[in-house]
Amino acid sequence: MKLSDSTTQILKNYASINSNIVFNPGSRITTISEARNILSSATVDASFPSCFGVYDLNEFLGVLSLVDEPQVKFEDKFAVIADSTGRSKIKYFFTDTDMLTSPNGTMLDKAMAMDSFEVEFELDPETLNKVKRAASALGHSVVSVTADNGSLVLTVFDAENPTTNTFSIDLNGTYESENFSFVLSIANLKIIPGTYKVGLSSKLMSRFTHTEQDVTYWIALEKSSTYGA
C-alpha cells in the first residue's frame, strides 16, 4: 500500500489532535483528543486491512519519510515499510489498541447523527487565517460567534478582560435567534485547510464539514457560550 499525499495530510493533522491513533479495517479513520473536546472522522483513499494501533503518529510519519516512495505491507503485529526497489526496509511495530485513546463507535455514531444547529455558516480559509492571525497579534485565545444587524460576526477577544482590543469580521449565515454568543477556543481549530460548512449547537458542540473532502470535525464549544435568555 502507498499512502497518498491527501491521506498523509490528514494523518499529519490528526497527529496534532492526538499523538496516537487506532486504525480500523477500511478507509475511514478517526481520532479524538485526550481532552475529548475534538473528534474527527475522515474517509481516505487507502484501505487498511486490519485493526492496529500507532503510539506516536508523528514518529510513524517520520519513518515513512525515511524511504523514497514508501510502500507499506501490514502484518499482524507490525508493518514493513520499504522503498519502491525493496532495497531499504523498516519494520515498525504496532501498539496494543487498549493502550491508546480512540473514539468508540457509540460516540462517533452520536456525533454523526447531529443534524440540528441553531447557527450555520460557511467558513473559508482566508477568514479563518485572519482570525488566527488576529488572535496571535492580540494575544487572545478565543473567538465568539454572535449576530448583529442580520449578519454573523466572528470576534477575537479576551474572555477575561472585556476592555481589551478585539478583532471582528462579518460573514453570511443563518440563525434562529439573535440572542446567542457561541465561543470557540482557537487552539481547538485544528482542521486541514479548506472551506467548511459550520454548524453551532446550543448543546455546546460545533461541526465543521469540509466542502471538498470527506472530513468532519466536531469541536466542543466553550462553557462560557450562551444561547437564549
Image (cartoon, rainbow, N blue to C red):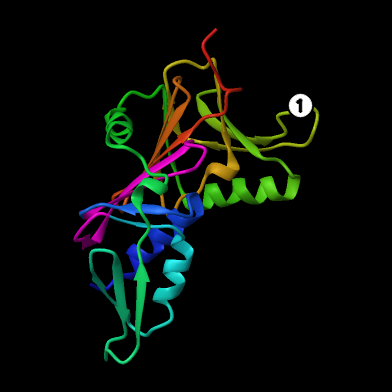
Task: Residue 136 in the image: state x and y as whole percent.
Answer: 70, 50
Asked if residue 147 can be seen in this view, the reply is no
Q: Reply yes or no: does residue 48 show up in magenta.
A: yes
Going by the numbered disc 1, the residue's amino acid type is Pro
**Residue drawn at point x = 19 percent, y = 61 percent:** 49
Q: Which residue is mark 1?
A: 162
96, 32: nearer the viewer: 96
- Among the 4 quarters of the image, the one containing residue 103: top left
- Among the 4 quarters of the image, the one containing residue 81: bottom left
172, 1: nearer the viewer: 1
Secondary structure, mark 1, is loop
Q: Is residue 167 left or right of residue 222?
A: right
Q: Quadrant of the N terminus?
A: bottom left
Asked if residue 106 can be seen in this view, the reply is yes
**Residue drawn at point x = 61 percent, y = 36 percent:** 143
Q: Is residue 70 left or right of residue 189?
A: left
Magenta region, main secondary structure: strand
Task: Residue 63 in the image: state x and y as whole percent.
Answer: 43, 74
- Report the span colored magenta: 26-51
Q: Reply yes or no: does residue 94 show up in magenta.
A: no
Q: Is residue 21 left or right of residue 125?
A: left
188, 96: nearer the viewer: 96
Q: Residues within 10 Å of mark 1 (few under 14, many from 20)?
A: few
131, 18: nearer the viewer: 18
**Residue drawn at point x = 31 percent, y = 85 percent:** 83
